[in-house]
Amino acid sequence: MASSTEVGAVRDLRSALARLEREPGQLVVTDHPVDPNGELAGVYKRVGAGGTVERPTGTGPAMLFRSVKGYPGSQVLVGLMASRERVATLLGSHPRALARHLAAGYEAAMAPVEVDGPAPCQEVVHRADDPDFDVRRILPAPTNTDLDAGPYFCLGLVLGSDPELGRDVTIHRLCVQGRDEISVFFAPGRHLDAFRERAVAAGRRFPVTVNMGLDPAVYLGAVFEAPTTPLGFDELSIAGGLRGAPVELVRAVTVDEVAIASAEVVIEGYLDSDHLVAEDQNTGTGRAMPEFPGYVGPAHPALPVIKVTAVTTRRNPILQTLVGPGEEHVSLAGIPTEASIQRVLDAAMPGFVTEVYSHPAGGGKLLEILKVAKRNELDDGRARQAALIAFGVYPELKHLVLVDDDVEIFDPGDILWAMTTRMQADLDIITIPGVSGHMLDPSQSPEYNPRLPAQGTTAKTIFDATVPRRLHERFERAHFRDVDPTPWLAGVAAGGLAGGDGLAGGDVDAGGDGDVDHLPT
């Protein structure tokens, strides 16, 4: 792990952007005015959103918008983690090695430390008791689509504590409802929601901070889930392990909680469980925002709210956001999932599962690919056992594809080839009905399948696209000479070739023209 004291080390969002400045085609900084209401997401949808976003879309550079209509002095960043290549660059790793890199960060977990304030995140303080305070005028929260219930903070890391269990950090759907109110959507089983319920039962107020504009290691560490991070596990310690230095925290200005000292933006307040609001109370659209499966889900009729007491920021703050169903969600949810599964399988079956990949078609949560190294007929059963272990490690997983070690796990065409030529449906598709999954997948509902008892229940599927070991010689791929084509391609632009060290035999097109302005300080 690289020390955070190294020259050029990524220690906050601004140092992350400084690193991307040195990588051609990975960051575009623009002063062309943009409207946060739908337009910003519409721009990035075409440039680099990827994932399950409506086509046309693609993989492209991160974009920093420095001129946001109606918000002088504010900036919005989108797409920082919207490619594996960028994540690897920011973490000092390689795209193929990210699962084991994050697993190593988990093993090297380092507890955060509290520092004296004021911190960088508190250079500017807006207090809610000021009669002119209005979070809607301070921060340019974007909308993704014209159906959104309202403006959303899509990368708000909510931090809260329980006096007995410890600290939790989680990313939630945060919709701005008024001058000092933000609704919070909790998917079932979230630890922060358990903390909130314990506070309600004990008659305590529940202070929280919402931290935005962070070191990528903080975001990636925060989205590890149970059972890898059980109730009370402080996910900020994983970021410390990844960075080789602890995350620094500072006491909030108006509530008895801590905030991430290097954050660009911090919202302070109390999570109010007595006051519930309809998510779309201000728009009446009936919809929330586009979620990772690619659909705009229904607005929730009754959500708790954060009663905001203050907003603190750095000078010229950078608000960080994402396009809901895009590749950035795949990175955030999928790479920690890969790390959790790889870590457990390495312990249970050393050397057997060689690679794990959370495919973008599942938004980083629903579809996993496992590459296995079969060596004998007993391994036919071990491959399926590995799939069952993966379902236990990550309960929201829906579909899992097993492939042999001659298949390129990051190439969808190669995966589909294996499923087409190495699988028979009546022998090699195993379903596990009636298992808990993820409520944001619209097919996981009694309306879709009356046999399902509740929203978020599903049939899980193993697609075994591996060759039965006794037949492995019959399924050996055709081998070609490995010839360097350079002498035959003199004068051909490098961009017209497949090759390099990308994930699937070719580098991903970064898009854009590679022009990068200097960053704000």
Image (cartoon, grey):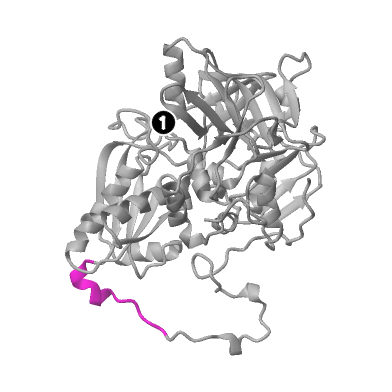
Closer-to-camera residue (500/350): 350
Q: Which residue is mark 1?
A: 232
> Does the magenta portion include 517?
no
Image quadrant containing the C terminus? top right
Can see residue 429? no
**Residue bounds of the magenta highlight:** 468-480
Can see residue 399? yes
Q: Residue at x 39, y 52 (%)?
A: 368
Amino acid found under the numbered disc labelled 1: Gly
- In the image, residue 77 above or below residue 463: above
Q: Residue at x 71, y 53 (%)?
A: 18
- In the image, residue 247 above or below residue 30: above
Closer-to-camera residue (286/5): 5
Q: Residue at x 79, y 33 (%)?
A: 71
Residue 371 place in picture, x, y as percent: 35, 61
What kind of element bears circle 1? loop
* Left or right of residue 375, residue 355 in this image: right
Residue 77 place in picture, x, y as percent: 69, 44
